[in-house]
């Protein structure tokens, strides 16, 4: 079990690494190879920023719905990591001089624009619906913990699919590196959450 000090050190390390990655992209930003608005690099940055924002929101909700230190620590780590990555993604779009929103459907850059959006506010695969977000906000204790872990497992699975798309299609080296890091980090958390669900007599939804 990590201590608060250990978590703080880990977060600080993430922030330092993020600064280095952002700087590296800034160096690329002035080159003739700046991504186009309809590129995979730009599409991934836009879509993953939206995807990450919901994970941050879910994590803050469950933090206030349970006293369980294990779940609160996971939620803190997810919120801090994904908020930081979201800032990098949006910062890169600024550096490239590209819009943060697009008229195209989400995941068009992956060839999934006609099937990405679901019903009830779920914009991309893995994202919770509006009804699910309201349900999470209404629960407390073990029920909130289980539902959060199930939602976040689905969310990570969708995020991994998108990140793998960037690893395959993106052209900016440091963005591909970040995407690969997302794949590995979120898969590790999926494995962790499977164990946490089992401890609570539950299992992933899919």
Image (cartoon, helix red, strand yellow):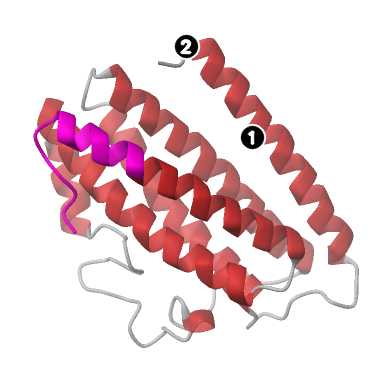
In this rendering, would 51 be left or right of 121? right
Q: Which residues are magenta?
A: 191-206
Q: Which mark is residue 3?
A: 2
**Dot 2 crowding, Cα within 10 Å, few <14, some 14–19, many 20+:** few
In this rendering, would 135 be left or right of 167? left
**Dot 1 crowding, Cα within 10 Å, few <14, some 14–19, many 20+:** some
In this rendering, would 47 be left or right of 11? left
Q: Say whether residue 125 is visible.
A: yes
Q: Residue at x 62, y 77 (%)?
A: 169
Q: Residue at x 33, y 55 (%)?
A: 155
User: In which quadrant is the C terminus drawn?
Assistant: bottom left
In this rendering, would 136 be left or right of 85? left
Residue 178 drawn at (x, y percent): 63, 54
Q: Considering the numbered disc 1 on the image, is that residue within a helix, a strand or a loop?
A: helix
Q: Earlier in the sequence, mark 1 or mark 2?
A: 2
Q: Which residue is mark 1?
A: 14
Q: Residue at x 72, y 38 (%)?
A: 17
Q: Residue at x 37, y 62 (%)?
A: 158
Quadrant of residue 195 in the image? top left
């Amino acid at each position: 079990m990590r201590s608060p000090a250990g978590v703080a050190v880990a977060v600080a390390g993430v922030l330092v690494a993020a600064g280095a990655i952002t700087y590296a992209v800034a160096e690329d930003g002035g080159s003739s190879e700046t991504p186009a608005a309809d590129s995979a690099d730009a599409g991934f940055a836009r879509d993953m920023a939206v995807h990450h924002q919901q994970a941050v929101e879910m994590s803050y909700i469950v933090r206030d719905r349970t006293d369980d230190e294990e779940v609160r620590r996971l939620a803190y780590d997810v919120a801090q990591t994904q908020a930081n990555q979201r800032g990098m993604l949006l910062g890169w779009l600024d550096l490239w001089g590209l819009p943060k929103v697009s008229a195209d459907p989400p995941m068009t850059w992956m060839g999934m624009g006609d099937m990405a959006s679901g019903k009830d506010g779920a914009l991309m695969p893995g994202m919770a619906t509006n009804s699910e977000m309201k349900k999470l906000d209404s629960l407390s204790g073990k029920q909130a913990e289980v539902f959060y872990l199930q939602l976040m497992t689905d969310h990570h699975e969708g995020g991994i699919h998108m990140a793998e798309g960037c690893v395959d299609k993106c052209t900016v080296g440091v963005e591909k590196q970040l995407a690969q890091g997302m794949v590995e980090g979120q898969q590790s958390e999926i494995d962790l959450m499977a164990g946490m669900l089992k401890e609570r007599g539950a299992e992933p939804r899919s």
